[in-house]
Image (cartoon, helix red, strand yellow):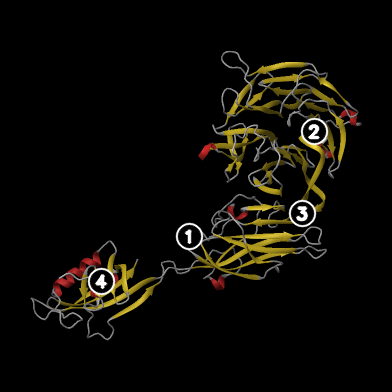
Amino acid sequence: MTYTASDVPGRADVLINGEVYRYLDLEDVKGISSFAPTFLQRTNVSDAYGDEDQDWWLTMGQRDWSLGEGQRYSSVTDPDSARRYWLGEAVDVNRAGQVTLLPAKLTNTAAAAVQGCFSYGHPSSGQLVVVGGTNAYLLSTTGSFTSLLAHGCTTPYPTSSIGDGEEGATSADRVILVGGTGQIRAHDGTGWSNFDATHGVSSAAYLNNTYYGIKDGVLYRWSSAGARTTLFSWQSSRGNVYTASNPGMIVAYGGDIAILLNGIGGDISTLWIYDGVAPAVVAQFTRGFLAYSLAVVDGALLIGGIYVKDSASAVIQVRPAVFAFTGGGLAELWSSETWLHTGVEPYGSGTVPEFPFVAAYDGGAVWNDDSAGLMKFYRPSTGAITTLFAYTVAGDSPTIGANSQSFAMVRDQTTVYQYPNRATTATSGYITTSLFDGSTTRTKRFKSVVVEFDAATDGNGGTVDIAYRLNDVDGSYTSVQSGATSGTEYAIGQNGRAISIKVTLNKGTSTLGPRLKRIYVRAAPLLDTFRKERYVLDLSGVDGEQHVFMRDGQTVHPKDGLAMATDLRTAIASTSPISITDEFGTYNAYLVPEECEIRRVRSQEYVAVVTAREV
């Protein structure tokens, strides 16, 4: 006779591995039903905050953010991971152990759309020049414009304008050159004149008393008097000069000229070095990456560009990225996680999002991230990348002019974003932590969060807001407390695998705003429970006599004690889970060998005590 789970608990007490058994009625305890503890009963990942008396809780926290943003998950075993976070804005993390507000940005409005921007005079002056289609303007560190009147240049390229950086006694010693499609114009502090009346440039650099420029696949140089010399032309095998799909960009690189090109001899971006003799390729980018901007930062070349790929319906997708070249090869320094749809071919389309323009600033580099509308800052000494401010993604052909004091971004529109505004601190800034998961994928009960900070010493001291997001960092955060008190534990009371905490610093009426010192979260793992059962079984009957009656009192068990014991030994020795059904239901389990025994009470008759652990 074949028995199934439907026979329990009617005709049989328990079904083990397809065989039925009856509890031994002579025993006072015929079995014990319980739940097994997990293999890891308690887990505590502590940041030495003094949680020894509550080891049940996972304590996850952070008190240093100095290695910058871009880390999605935090690791408790990696000391560098403990110093990084996911994303922030307008916060200074450079000093270990604290987060403070950065200066605000200036949002200026020029008299007309401006496309070019570069440093003017000695870098310590902090002055910048912005160039429009008709006029050029001096831009002071406080955001005021002074017109340099009409430059007289036809269609100036965004990267064709430079200043010689000389620190002279008068403004006449500081020369501005603006190149366009057909000429180069110079401003000596008093007015404009032709530097080269018949030839323009798309990108320019000043090195060793010489003005260098590139246009339409040809590299030129000019003497201080404006005499032009052709240095090199990029040609096909048939002698035709290539016209790059991108105008290209050049910068002074030590005693050489670094040259960034697209579309020379194909659709692959290349990096060249001109050493005074001839340009030579030093690096080639992967196909599908379009390089756009070039800057020298801490002895390295940083290159901004975009990854490009097609998607459905011939829609172009782009993803901004920045590479570093240190002489030994290219390495990706940063890239956006977001692919953006442009709908058209991105090169020269005049649509947003646009390429990141990299510029040297304050011992590091800045670039625009149009995928999120955020201005990034890279600090070479630590490798940290942070966000200075947010901006509106509009216009096209972003160009950043910078010196040691300030920088500004122009986008062929009247709006000019300038940084920093040294007169005031940002109204607010935030930091979102990496996902804390305690290095375990178990679901947890996130009990509470504590934030420690110092209030500012003037005004209302500023305020701090706390929010959280479970399981990912892509989306809105749920508020925990606005105007939090330092050191106070605020309840979260939510289940999840991981959590990210967002802390917003608000300046209020203070001068500098509060200073963040520590974030920590308390959670408990939700431990899985498994059945653990102990059965006492009657294995009676021998040679067809005195077989066990089934629980219905009418059916005789078809097997004698020896046969039942043999089946049970097979189940105990099984290396695969077996099915067990009792009055509480059906579950998969192993019979625990060290907790199982078959006691012989008479020849070929037994009493079995077995323990089953659910899996």
CB within 8 Å, label 3 to label 4? no
Q: Nearer the viewer, residue 205 or 15?
A: 15
Q: Which residue is mark 4?
A: 5
Q: Is residue 566 left or right of residue 69?
A: left
Which label's residue is closer to the chain start, 1 or 4? 4
Q: Which mark is residue 441?
A: 1
13, above or below 363, in the image: below
Q: Where in the figure is residue 378, as x and y percent of width and height?
A: 68, 44
CB within 8 Å, label 2 to label 4? no
171, above or below 570, in the image: above
Q: Which residue is mark 3?
A: 426
Q: Residue at x 54, y 69 (%)?
A: 57
- Alpha carbon distance from label 2 to label 4: 85 Å
Q: Where in the figure is residue 274, as x and y percent of width and height?
A: 67, 23
Q: Would you call the spot at circle 4 few (<14 residues within 10 Å), some (14-19), or many (20 or more)?
A: many
Q: Which residue is mark 2?
A: 131
Which label's residue is closer to the chain start, 2 or 1? 2
- Alpha carbon distance from label 3 to label 4: 69 Å
Q: Is residue 438 left or right of residue 397?
A: left
* Corner quadrant of residue 363: top right
Q: Where in the figure is residue 134, as x and y percent of width and height?
A: 82, 30
Q: Secondary structure at mark 4?
A: helix
Q: Residue at x 83, y 18 (%)?
A: 225
- Alpha carbon distance from label 3 to label 2: 28 Å
